[in-house]
Image (cartoon, rainbow, N blue to C red):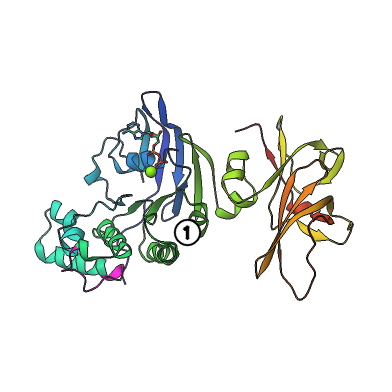
């Protein structure tokens, strides 16, 4: 068990822009990473995640903007003086060197004494559960083990900031799930501000204290996993995270209106030119008939899929909109049949109205 010896540092990014010809890889990005937090950059391929991480690490110099670690401006500080550890998307390990050689490399570059290197390497390998693997060669290791070596190398000098670029994307699902939990434990054990990159929304929801959703080099929303999922700020975030049906609505009495039907909402309706009601499959429920206080929709079941612990129902609303509903399987309750008329209920607390005019 490694005891934290230094305090974690907050990261302050202000108005950072990076262009490659006509491409705005980063477009006026400002973000505050709290000291000791696990923050994930989540976005589609090409959205600017790696560029932002490279700016934090010092491998990419932005066109303009400011970057502070704690109170220090570091935008002109070279990478090796930034006191941070990083894992790269490709692992970037030296295949013919031993595990210990790879993990100790950053310390060798820093010209640390041999005895100290040996001690720190052993400690880092223990931390990632590779104790005793020091003399193996990288090309004798599995994908999951290589990934751990990359992490050990990133934490070997106990940096105050850890940057990880899609560290699990090359692993199969089972190992990925296991490593997500392990990396999270590691974060709790070592006192490091962590910026983690992934394009996998489930991974981001599982691991992060907060998530910054990135698109076209801009931060679309920065929030906790729960707030992102339940209160997306715009259509892009609502679409990118989870599955949803969107209905075009207008502002109405006590909420919104859809196709002339009043819908009650328990939340404030955004001030926006275009509004949409976002309906998550697990929030809309099957009803025997209208229930007081609930918003109800008449629909026709088009497809019913039994999934063991739950069922997935696809239905068509009066205007033809397709909607998905997921419900728990309980006892011997009958499921609707294809073509059957069904009533769907949506509680006012579960209505989420988003600003659809922002992309
Ligand atoms: P992500 O990591 O989210 O997939 P990147 O940060 O790698 O995205 O890239 C963001 C955008 O910047 C992309 O359009 C990419 O093609 C472009 N880009 C990144 N690095 C370079 C580079 N060195 N030269 C030219 N274009 C680049
Ligand atoms: Mg990338």
Q: Relative to the observer, which residue lies in front, 256 or 279?
A: 279
Is ligand 2 closer than 8 angstroms to the Cβ of mark 1?
no
Image coords of residue 128 (percent x, y)? 31, 67
Q: Residues within 10 Å of mark 1 (few under 14, many from 20)?
A: many
Q: Is residue 54 magenta?
A: no
With 355 as the anchor, is 120 left or right in this view? left
The residue indicated by pointer 1 is 207
Front residue of this view, candidates 328 and 149: 328
User: Which region of the structure is painted magenta?
Assistant: 126-137
For the C terminus, the image quarter is: top right
Q: Is residue 13 visible?
A: yes
Check the image and report above or below for 131 versus 327: below
Question: Between 276 and 228, which is closer to the camera in this rendering?
Answer: 276
Task: Determine whether, in the image, residue 339 is placed left or right of residue 219.
Answer: right
- Considering every residue shown, the one lying at the far top of the view is 22
| Number of numbered labels in the structure image | 1
Q: Residue at x 20, y 65 (%)?
A: 121
Find residue 318 and report its image quarter: top right
Split into quadrants, the picture shows ligand 1 in the one at top left
Residue 218 at x, y = what percent?
48, 35
- Look at the numbered disc 1 and give the secondary structure of its residue: helix
Q: Is residue 294 left or right of residue 70?
A: right
Which residue occupies the extreme bottom position in the image?
Answer: 331
> Magenta segment: does it hold 131?
yes
The location of residue 244, given as percent across then percent down, is 66, 48
């Amino acid at each position: 068990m490694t005891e934290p010896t230094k305090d974690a540092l907050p990261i302050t990014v202000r108005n950072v822009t990076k262009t490659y010809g006509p491409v705005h890889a980063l477009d006026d990005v400002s973000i505050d990473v709290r000291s000791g937090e696990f923050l994930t950059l989540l976005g589609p391929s090409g959205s600017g995640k790696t560029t932002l991480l490279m700016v934090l690490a010092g491998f990419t110099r932005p066109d303009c903007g400011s970057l502070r670690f704690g109170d220090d401006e570091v935008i002109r500080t070279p990478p090796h003086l930034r006191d941070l550890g990083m894992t790269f998307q490709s692992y970037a390990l030296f295949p013919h060197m031993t595990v210990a050689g790879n993990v100790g490399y950053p310390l060798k570059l820093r010209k640390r004494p041999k005895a100290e290197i040996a001690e720190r390497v052993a400690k880092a390998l223990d931390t990632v559960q590779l104790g005793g693997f020091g003399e193996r060669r990288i090309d004798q290791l599995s994908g999951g083990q290589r990934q751990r070596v990359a992490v050990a190398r990133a934490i070997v000098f106990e940096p105050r900031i850890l940057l990880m670029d899609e560290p699990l994307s090359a692993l199969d699902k089972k190992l990925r799930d296991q490593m997500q939990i392990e990396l999270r434990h590691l974060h709790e054990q070592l006192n490091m501000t962590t910026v983690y990159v992934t394009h996998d929304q489930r991974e981001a929801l599982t691991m992060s204290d907060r998530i910054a959703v990135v698109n076209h080099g801009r931060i679309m929303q920065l929030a906790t996993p729960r707030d992102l999922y339940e209160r997306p700020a715009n259509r892009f975030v609502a679409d990118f995270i989870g599955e949803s049906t969107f209905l075009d609505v207008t502002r109405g009495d006590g909420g919104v209106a859809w196709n002339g039907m009043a819908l009650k909402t328990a939340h404030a309706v955004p001030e926006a030119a275009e509004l949409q009601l976002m309906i998550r499959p697990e929030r809309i429920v099957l009803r025997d008939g209208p229930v007081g206080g609930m918003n109800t929709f008449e629909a026709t079941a088009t497809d019913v899929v039994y999934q063991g612990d739950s069922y997935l129902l696809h239905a068509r609303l009066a205007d033809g909109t397709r909607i998905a509903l997921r419900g728990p399987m309980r006892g011997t309750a009958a499921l609707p049949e294809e073509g059957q008329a069904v009533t769907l209920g949506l509680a006012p607390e579960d209505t989420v109205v988003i600003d659809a005019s922002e992309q």
